[in-house]
């Protein structure tokens, strides 16, 4: 299971939330899904490039022009947000709502 890739970057209460996301990504690979899970080095490089440290990317979607980073928001408000270019452009109230949205998109 790929859920361990950012374990030590997340608070304990969010670690379990990675499991259904990683399972969804793994099950979607056979459908040429455009979503992927980032590696820990990729997350660290993202932060080093100046991206907000309160956001931990858990899903990446590469588009033609920009890359969307679906993140756990450690400052809360909305637990899952999408960050693109320089701003949060969407949010979900729960991991379940986010996975339901992913399912429609794939």
Image: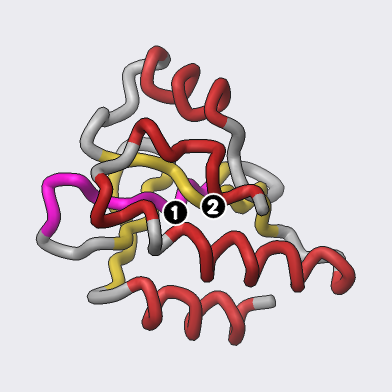
Percent coordinates x, y for residue 5 in the rendering: 55, 37
The picture quadrant where one finds residue 82 is bottom left
Alpha carbon of mark 2 to alpha carbon of mark 1: how far? Answer: 5 Å
Depicted 53 relative to depicted 69: above or below: above
The tag on residue 50 is none
Q: Residue furthest top?
A: 48
Q: Residues within 10 Å of mark 1 (few under 14, many from 20)?
A: many
Q: Residues within 10 Å of mark 2 (few under 14, many from 20)?
A: many
Q: For mark 2, what is the residue?
A: 59
* Mark 2 or mark 1, earlier in chain: 2
Answer with left or right where residue 21 lies relative to residue 30: left
SS for dot 1? strand
Answer with left or right where residue 106 lies relative to residue 86: right
Residue under the image location 24 percent in, 62 percent down: 79
Viewer-nearest residue: 40 or 83 = 40
Percent coordinates x, y for residue 105 in the rendering: 62, 78
Answer with left or right where residue 32 lies relative to residue 17: right
Viewer-nearest residue: 13 or 76 = 13
Percent coordinates x, y for residue 51 in the rendering: 33, 26
Residue under the image location 33 percent in, 18 percent down: 50
Viewer-nearest residue: 77 or 87 = 77
Q: Is residue 72 one of those drawn in magenta?
A: yes
Q: For mark 1, what is the residue?
A: 70
Residue under the image location 37 percent in, 82 percent down: 97
The picture quadrant where one finds residue 80 is bottom left
Depicted 76 relative to depicted 10: above or below: below
Range drawn in magenta: 68-76
């Amino acid at each position: 299971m790929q859920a361990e890739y950012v374990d030590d970057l997340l608070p304990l209460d969010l670690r379990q939330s990675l499991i259904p996301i990683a399972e969804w990504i793994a099950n979607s690979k056979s459908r040429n899904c455009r979503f992927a899970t980032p590696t820990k080095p990729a997350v660290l490089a993202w932060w080093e490039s100046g991206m907000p440290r309160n956001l931990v990317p858990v899903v990446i979607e590469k588009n033609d022009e920009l890359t969307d980073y679906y993140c756990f928001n450690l400052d809360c408000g909305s637990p899952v947000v999408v960050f693109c270019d320089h701003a949060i452009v969407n949010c979900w109230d729960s991991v379940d709502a986010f996975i339901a949205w992913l399912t429609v998109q794939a």
